[in-house]
Image (cartoon, grey):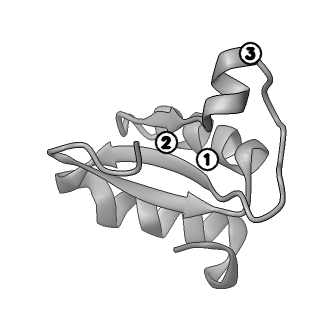
């Protein structure tokens, strides 16, 4: 679920960071959804970081650059893709 038509994913270090970014985006009035891995979604586990897992926050394509800039402001360039 990293790409849905009309939405783009901002990838961060892990699930906790994705939740943090989601809250910051909502405070900036940027619509978003955290994309959860199947294990966390199935068992209702939040904040779980498995090896190699990147957190993904989906935002509308037209707000992607804004969301990316906010993510870089919070986490720095090296943590964002």
Front label number (3 vs 2): 3
Residue 55 image position (x, y, % from top left): 63, 52
**Label 1: element kind:** helix
Which residue matches tag 3? 44
Task: Decide: is 2 above or below 25.
Answer: below
Q: In this view, does 40 lie above or below 6?
A: above
* Neighbours of disc 2 within 10 Å: few (<14), some (14-19), many (20+): many
Q: What element carries label 2?
A: helix
First reached walking from the N terminus: tag 3 or tag 1? 1
Q: Quadrant of residue 72?
A: bottom right
Q: Please, which residue is most extreme toward the bottom here?
A: 78
Q: Which of 68 and 55 is in front in this view?
A: 55
- Circle 3 residues within 10 Å: few <14, some 14–19, many ≥20: few
Nearer the observer, 69 or 42: 42
The residue pinned by badge 2 equals: 25
* Residue shown at 40% from the left, 42% from the top: 1
Q: Distance between the residues labelled 3 and 2?
A: 22 Å
Q: Nearer the viewer, mark 3 or mark 1?
A: 3
Give me the residue at 17% from left, 54% from top: 62
Question: Residue sitting at 46 percent across and 59 percent down?
Answer: 10
Return the x and y of residue 41 as percentages of the image width and height: 64, 23
Q: Is residue 42 left or right of residue 22?
A: right
Residue wearing tag 1: 21
Q: Position of residue 16 (x, y in %)?
A: 77, 43
Give the Cα distance between marks 3 and 1.
19 Å
Q: Which of 54 and 59 is in front in this view?
A: 54
Asked whether the residues under the numbered discs 2 and 1 touch, taking CB atoms below 8 Å apart as contact, a structural biologist would say yes
Asked whether the beta carbons under mark 3 and mark 2 sit within 8 Å of each other, the answer is no
Tell me if mark 1 has few (under 14), some (14-19) or many (20+) residues whose alpha carbon lies within 10 angstroms of its own: many
Give the mark, 3 or 2, whose residue is nearer the N terminus.
Answer: 2
SS state under label 3: loop
**1 w.r.t. 50: above or below:** above
């Amino acid at each position: 679920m990293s790409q849905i038509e009309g939405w783009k994913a901002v990838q961060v270090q892990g699930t906790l960071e994705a939740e943090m970014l989601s809250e910051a985006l909502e405070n900036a009035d940027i619509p978003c959804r955290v994309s959860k891995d199947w294990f966390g979604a199935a068992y209702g586990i939040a904040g779980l970081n498995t090896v190699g897992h990147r957190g993904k926050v989906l935002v509308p394509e037209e707000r992607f650059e804004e969301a990316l800039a906010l993510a870089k402001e919070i986490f720095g360039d090296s943590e964002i893709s």
